[in-house]
Image (cartoon, rainbow, N blue to C red):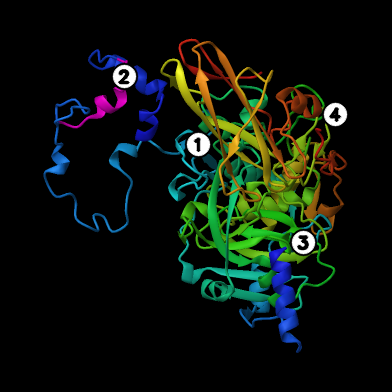
Amino acid sequence: MYTRSLCLLLLVAGGAAHADRLGIGAPASAEIVRAWNIDVAPNGEGLPPGRGSVSAGARIYAERCAACHGPNGEGKPQDRLTGGGGTLASSDPVKTIGSFWPYATTLFDYVRRAMPFNAPQSLGYEEVYALVAYLLYLNGIVQADAVMDQHSLPAVRMPNRDGFVPDPRPDIR
Amino acid sequence: MSSSDNRSRWIHLSRRQFFRRSAGVAISGLVPLAGRATGTGAAPDSPNLVPPWMKTQGRPILSPPYGERSPYEVAVVRIPIPGRTNTTTAAASLTPLQSLHGIITPSGLVFERHHAGVPDIPPQEHRLLVHGLVERALIFTMDDLMRFPSVSRIHFLECSGNSAGEWKARGSTVQVTHGLLSCCEWTGVPLALVLQEAGVDPRAKWLLAEGADAAAMTRSIPMEKALDDALLVYAQNGEMLRPEQGYPLRLFLPGFEGNMSVKWLRRLKLGDAPFMTREETSKYTDLMPDGTARQFTFVMEAKSVIVRPSGGQMLRGPGFVEIYGYAWSGRGRIRRVDVSVDGGRSWREARLQEPVLPKCLTAFRVPWQWDGTPALLQSRAQDDTDYWQPARSALLAARGVDSYYHYNAIQSWRIGPDGAVENVHA
């Protein structure tokens, strides 16, 4: 609220074009925007060129991921990545990529920015595509011969895609 | 425990057990102070005693230049979440609410929740990029950001996972049950002013906030919130941010779950849809009994907790007790807090300590004469939207026990006939 009234104040006080601007900050170069713009949207926007196969992903997973997430994504000591299908409404829900994650693109986004835990942002795009392909394969979502790229990944439909609802709170009166 | 706590009617159970074990010291009277006396050998309440610190000059100024608290208070610290930390960098630590006085959390006691540890960022090397659906992409230095008109606001910060252990189990102390909660004075620039410099495209409905930590933590923020009361914060409690709180720059969204107030903020990207990051899909969504998960559950609903007496403490026998606690709401101001000593059969309206600010901790007090019989202490808060903090039974009836986040039920502390205080689910 207070920011709105402040903006209004500046607007009224000025009058000329851009009078509401203070002129602070520098134009960001296209190079910086390109380098920093690493997020990937559900529609695939932001996915880089490159491709990766399930088999290539299996090799990278064994080397870079299995120590924390288990040889087959079963977890321990860190997050479980596979299984749990059909458990969300049970008394023992198991939330994994396969049972819970609504978008496959989020996998690319997250692995690229934050994994592996001991060396974030160290994987190349093709390695990330391959890992994503392998994790989807481990969850029974793509076939063993699948290849992930900027066209095939956004087309993957996750099992729990429709499992999310908006915030209905306050829900207790 | 602080010394003022020791002068009041509680002692910490562990300390009591410690003194019981140490040389058979009697546990009646002001045991902790006597036990910690440092060498005069005289009874502290002797009427003729001139203590040694009145017979010599004390420490000089600037010892040290950045002041430290009394050495008798160093036991008041953050602790990790018991049993839930299998890394030390993707982890959380808890504020010792039972030892706080007033609504400001000292910066060194503010709870931590990091996804990849605390980065060490030289401020001169930090930049904030604003791009996406804007008229012009801009990049800001810290000097740039500190040139903007500034504001200071006192707001609570609460992780939506605060009290998550209470869905299915019982934490031993209020630090464990409610310690992902702090309240500070935050200083920075209204986000709306910074976005105005870049020129917001009317198609922009969401804003991606990204941190400069090793998780490059990201959340999607609704533009409505970004243009309302969101802040870009660089200072906390009168000094520049602590590293654990996002130095040199963090987002701050008053009243929203703490995770969204992205620390070490380096990028803001405006878009026309939520970005569906890992932290707003697989985490920070609330699983319901029917298997659906609530998404974008941003606001922290009204909640309160009694911090003295609370779990692990000990009442020293019948007599006067000041019941002290905190209430807060992400929707606005606290209007009223009620306290019960009989498990909710009867309620008394608590006295609220000024100031009562929106989206801020409000301290409350109720004077009480404990008669030495078992009691069940509870508090319930109402905010200025007429919302009442729910009973545990009502919360579980609505959401089951697997939603993990946003537990805000009434907390119950049982006082036994021996004065021991423990967490119960009533």
Q: Tag 3 or tag 1, which sits nearer the N-term?
A: 1
Within-10-Å neighbours for mark 4: few <14, some 14–19, many 20+? few
Q: Are marks 1 and 3 on the same chain?
A: yes
Residue B2, can we see it?
A: no
> Which is more toward the observer, B29 or B105?
B29
Q: Secondary structure at mark 1?
A: helix
Q: Would you name the residue on which mark 3 appears?
A: B223
* Amino acid type, callout 3: Met
Residue bearing the label numbered 4: B290
Which residue is label 1 attached to?
Answer: B97
**Disc number lying in front (1 or 3):** 1
Camera-nearest label, 4 or 1? 1
Residue at screen point 66% across, 76% down: B138
Q: Earlier in the sequence, mark 4 or mark 2?
A: 2
How many angstroms separate mark 4 from mark 2 (CA)? Answer: 55 Å
Q: Residue furthest front?
A: B47
Magenta segment range? B27-39
Marks 4,2: beta carbons within 8 A = no
Q: Distance between the Cα atoms at labels 1 and 3? A: 33 Å
> Whole-Å distance between the Cαs marked 4 and 1?
35 Å
Specify whether A85 is left or right of A26. Answer: right
Q: Residue at x 79, y 64 (%)?
A: B271
The question of residue B36 being in magenta is answered with yes
Q: To which quarter of the image does residue B28 belong?
A: top left
Question: Mark 1 or mark 4, which is nearer the start of the sequence?
Answer: 1
Chain for mark 4? B
**Marks 2 and 1: which is nearer the front?**
2
Q: Amino acid at mark 4?
A: Asp
Chain of residue at mark 1: B
Say which of B273 and B40 sits in front: B40
Marks 2 and 1, how far apart at CA = 25 Å
Residue on which disc 2 sits? B29
